[in-house]
Image (cartoon, helix red, strand yellow):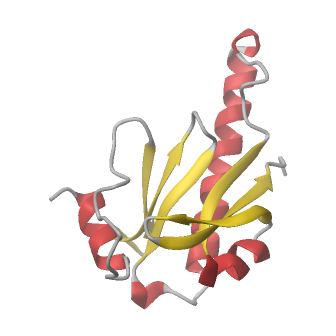
Amino acid sequence: MNLMSACRLCSIDQKPGFCLHAGLDGTCVHALFSLSIRPNEYLGTLRYDPKKAKIGRIALLPAYRRLGIGKQMMISFERQLLDGFKALADRAPLLLDSSIPTQIRLHSQLPVIGFYSKIGYQPVGPTFIEDGAPHQLMVKQLVAS
């Protein structure tokens, strides 16, 4: 089992219908997060699909939930996205076009919609079933600070 799978296995709720390996593929960016005081201990993970401008498979170890770490994890990743887009624009402005996303999106499970709303995500459209559970599409406008 690779490090990404191990972190995800420890952090997901063990519910029927959710597949550990469903989001592990080579087409997305996979990010692991650690604390600076313990850089070799990973506590969370997410994936980003640049073709869809979509964050997914967000997971945080249970011991680190409700401490503000998930919020920092998301904000940090969003900042890295913006920094990457800016660096690309500075180095190769002719390569950029309207396909560079101005917003990111995710599919939130219903119990954590409030978490994403607090960090700037807005619900869009009706709820839908994904992996056997109700979800809500949420989007956030990317704004350089």
Q: Quadrant of residue 110?
A: bottom right
**x%, y% of residue 38?**
37, 74
**x%, y% of residue 116?**
70, 72
Residue at image location 68% in from the left, 29% down from the top:
87
Residue at image location 78% in from the left, 56% down from the top:
140
**Above or below: residue 90 compared with residue 94:** below
Name of the residue lying farthest toward the top: 94
Residue at image location 75% in from the left, 56% down from the top:
139
Q: Is residue 4 left or right of residue 33?
A: left
Residue at image location 30% in from the left, 58% down from the top:
4
Q: Quadrant of residue 82?
A: top right
**Above or below: residue 120 compared with residue 54:** below
Q: Is residue 121 left or right of residue 26?
A: right
**x%, y% of residue 143?**
84, 49
**Above or below: residue 54 compared with residue 9:** above
Relative to the observer, which residue lies in front, 98 or 83? 98
Is residue 15 something that shows in the picture? yes
Relative to the observer, which residue lies in front, 144 or 39? 144
Relative to the observer, which residue lies in front, 26 or 7? 26
Q: Is residue 52 left or right of residue 34?
A: right
**x%, y% of residue 17?**
34, 71
Is residue 36 something that shows in the picture? no
Q: Is residue 12 left or right of residue 1?
A: right
The N terminus: image quadrant: bottom left
Instruction: Give the number of callouts.
Output: 0
**Above or below: residue 100 compared with residue 135:** above
